[in-house]
Amino acid sequence: MTKYKYPKSLPLITFFLNAETIRKNPIPFHKKSFEKYGDSFSVSLGWSRKIMLTRDPLIVKHILQKHHKNYFKSKIQTKYLTKYLGFGLLTSNGEQWLKQRRLIQPAFHKHKMEQLIGLMQTTIHANLDHIETDKLISVFPVMNTVAFNVIANSLFSESTHNETLSRLQKIIEQIQVFLVKEVRLPHKGWWFKLSGQVKHHKTLSEESRSILRNIIEERQRSQANHDDLLDMLLATRYEDTGKAMSMEQLIDEISILFVAGHETTANALTFTLFLLAKHPEIYTKVYEETVRVESEAQHPIERIGKLIYTRACIDEAMRLYPPAWITDRENYDDDSVGDFHIKKNTLIGVSFYELHRHPDYWERPNEFVPERFLGENKKKTTGHYYPFGAGPRMCIGLGFAIYEMVLTVSYIAKRYHLSTTQKEVRLNPLITLKPVDVSIIFNKR
């Protein structure tokens, strides 16, 4: 009989007594448990089933990079999403994921992303020119609209009517809200089905798929060249067959791009702006860098490369508040992970939030210090910083997101003073780490 070794186990009764608190916000419970049990701990779910939670960088590297082939995304991440979004890069595993990743990766090559900069910049400017000023406003809705319009215009350029995109945005937002309910309240799954909520949101999903199908078919009929993401995705071909993606697979991938490509960015931008508003001396440096770089470089790609301090502020905001704050994997086969020997199908949760604030790897871990990501200091972050995941499943849209965020923050810095009366930001750790009621005052410069 194989002898397995797991981290110190959290008493199941403790887990159950804290279940409601964990459901509402697991981060404080995770922090307390890590401090008590060490960088990894486990929970027994019966005689033979255990789950693990870790902030150990060696284990993180093991499962996401070194031995990634033995690990797959769990049903927790995929079963709810596939119901409404299909089997795209975010929701698939194994050969299906690898096949799609190889197909789509070229469309997100740096050179291809640079072709979208003009569309991206135009969209950002149009959405930020008319922010309400001289009063406290809720920032997330503004950033969410900016991020949605950036991904929409990057996918479809100007070829789709605003009313169509507006309807698509409303559907996606409604589905996301319900997805969170399903993930957070699995014990109410029977009620969601019985009350017709699951059916209603599946109907919304079909409507969104119909909208996307019409957009794609119209593009195929037009034969026009738009130099956007949709053109790039339509041009992709599988290496083994030379065929393009099927219509249904293309819709799956575009649905995933909308969901994964705008909310995480909106979250990160909201946290970044809050931190800059809270630290005016740092925000002044961003403004001064923006002014200087604009005088030195004309092309936006060149400017992005020179906005080093602005990028460092965004990196530091994502350290403190990683949009993808947690991920999980299960192992196909028994495995030795760090000091442990675990049984196949063990669910391992990786807390990027806790790793990013681990006092062993970060000086003043809870403070906003952008200088961590400048020059030689940046080398110290390697192996402890995962805002976009790691390994082969690292976020395919990393470059796209960085371009968008740097352009957005620098444009805001150029046009507006920021201030806030809030001392701290409240968190809602859902599928992504969401800011709650972040309010900032924008004053025109």
Image (cartoon, rainbow, N blue to C red):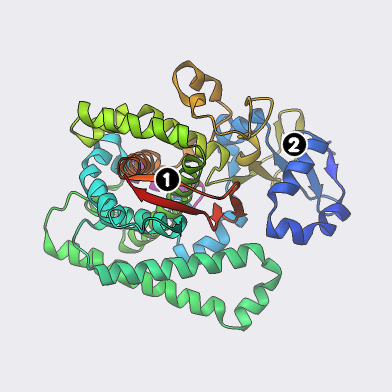
According to the picture, the residue beneath numbered tag 2 turns out to be 40
**Residue name at image x 88 percent, y 55 percent:** 13
Magenta segment: 91-105
Q: Residues within 10 Å of mark 1 (few under 14, many from 20)?
A: many
Q: Residues within 10 Å of mark 2 (few under 14, many from 20)?
A: many
Q: Depth check: give the residue in front, 126 or 215.
A: 126
Determine which quarter of the picture holds residue 101. Answer: top left
Tag of residue 141? none
Could you tell me the amino acid type at mark 2? Ser
Answer yes or no: is residue 243 visible. Answer: no
For mark 2, give the secondary structure. strand
Q: Relative to residue 152, is residue 412 depicted above or below?
A: above
- 225 w.r.t. 371: above or below: below
Give the residue displayed 43% in from the left and 66% down from the top.
172
Q: Which residue is mark 1?
A: 418
Q: Nearer the viewer, mark 1 or mark 2?
A: 1
Name which of mark 1 and mark 2 comes first in the sequence: 2
Determine if the magenta segment contains residue 100: yes
Q: Nearer the viewer, residue 64 or 322?
A: 322
Q: Are marks 1 and 2 in contact (CB under 8 Å)?
A: no
Mark pair 1, 2: CA separation: 40 Å
Residue 365 percent across, percent down from the top left: 63, 31
Q: Is 269 colored magenta in this rendering?
A: no
Horizontal and vertical percent position of residue 347: 69, 47
Coordinates of residue 290 in the picture (x, y in percent): 31, 33
